[in-house]
Image (cartoon, grey):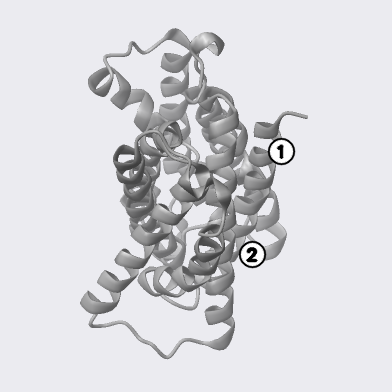
Amino acid sequence: MPKWFVYATISMLIWAAWSLLSTLVSRDIPGAMIQIVSTAGLVPVAVALLFSRNLRKFNHLRKGLVLASSTGLMAGMGNVLLYDALGHNGPASLVFPIISLAPLVPVIAAPFLFKERIRGIQVLGIAVALIAIVLLNATPSWQHEGGFAIGSTWMMYTLASLVLFGLTFLTQKGATYFISEELSTVAFTCSFVILALFLSCTGTTLNWNIPGRAGWLSVLIGILMGAGVLTMFGAYRNGKASIVTPYSQLYPVITVLAAVPLFHESIDLLRGTGIVAALAAGAVLSMDKTAAGT
């Protein structure tokens, strides 16, 4: 069994668990607080990796650290927006399929950043993504918002999070060219710590009276993030980005299926079609020529 498949499968399952716990905790505390507390769960994973023999394996330390740190910073800010989207009554069965469209960002950015052409399969993916967005936004944005999804607070947060997560695809794979997945995860965690300190110092309205359940679940979210980031870096190191990305991004399928019984969310025909289109677009947008290498 290929190493990338093992790493990517573990990562996919971890992100599915992370998405469900994030939905649960976001109902109790704001996104910034979840990010701060969850960092406490991420740090022990990074500390343990400091003793790894692979930590010193690199071919260009500065580039690798910059890319891995950038990944952590953008992912952390994306997390805050995602938690706030869920906290503003964003349905998990919609939020995470929309997030799965994140590969749309590197596909659109590649021609400008790397002078790459958008191929036919990716044009199809963009078209399917646009159809998905139309279908998902054609559903009235739940009675509490009183409008269409595109104008709702949770949708705005979700789309902003999508852009940030999409940018991490451009940096996460790049980091593995220069440093090990262990060192990448440590650098990623350092960015989380810096962001947590920033949020703590600037968040004057933060309520530190955290409910017990929300507190320990947030720490567990951090532990899951640490494990998920490590396995994703490992999957990217051992496999092609064009395969690893779409496979690992299948986790929203689990989220959608679990959200219905766990959070009592409903999926009508229009919504279901939009979800399927979003997940399909996320997979198609991640495809690349198999001969392109890693």
In percent of width and height, residue 56 lies at: 46, 46
Q: Which one is in front, 129 or 190? A: 190
Q: For marks 1 and 2, give the CA distance.
A: 30 Å
Please give left or right for residue 154 compared with residue 54 in the image: left
| Residue position marked by numbered label 1 in the rendering | 6
The disc, 1 or 2, on the residue closer to the chain's N-terminal end is 1
Q: Residue furthest bottom?
A: 209
Residue lying at the far right of the rendered structure = 1
Q: Which SS class for mark 1? A: helix
Q: Amino acid at mark 2?
A: Phe
Residue 208 visible at all: yes
Q: Residue at x 31, y 22 (%)?
A: 110
Viewer-proximal residue, 130 or 26? 26
Residue at the location (42% across, 36% down)?
133
Question: In this rendering, which labeled residue sits more in front, label 1 or label 2?
Answer: 1
Q: Closest to the observer: 35 or 84? A: 35
Above or below, 36 against 273 in this view is below
Counting from the top left corner in percent of width and height, residue 289 is at 51, 11
165 is higher (above) or lower (below) than 205:
above
> Where does residue 129 sit, x and y in percent of width and height?
45, 29
Judge left or right: residue 15 versus residue 81: right
Residue 57: percent from left, percent from top: 48, 41
Q: Is residue 171 shown above or below 76?
A: above
* Residue 148 visible to the viewer: no
Left or right of 52 on screen, residue 81: left
Classify mark 1: residues with Cα within 10 Å, few (<14), some (14-19) or many (20+). some
Quadrant housing residue 250: top right
Residue found 54% across the figure and 46% down from its top: 54
Q: Identify the disc placed on residue 217.
A: none
Q: Quadrant location of residue 1?
A: top right
> Secondary structure under badge 2?
helix
Numbered badge on residue 263: 2
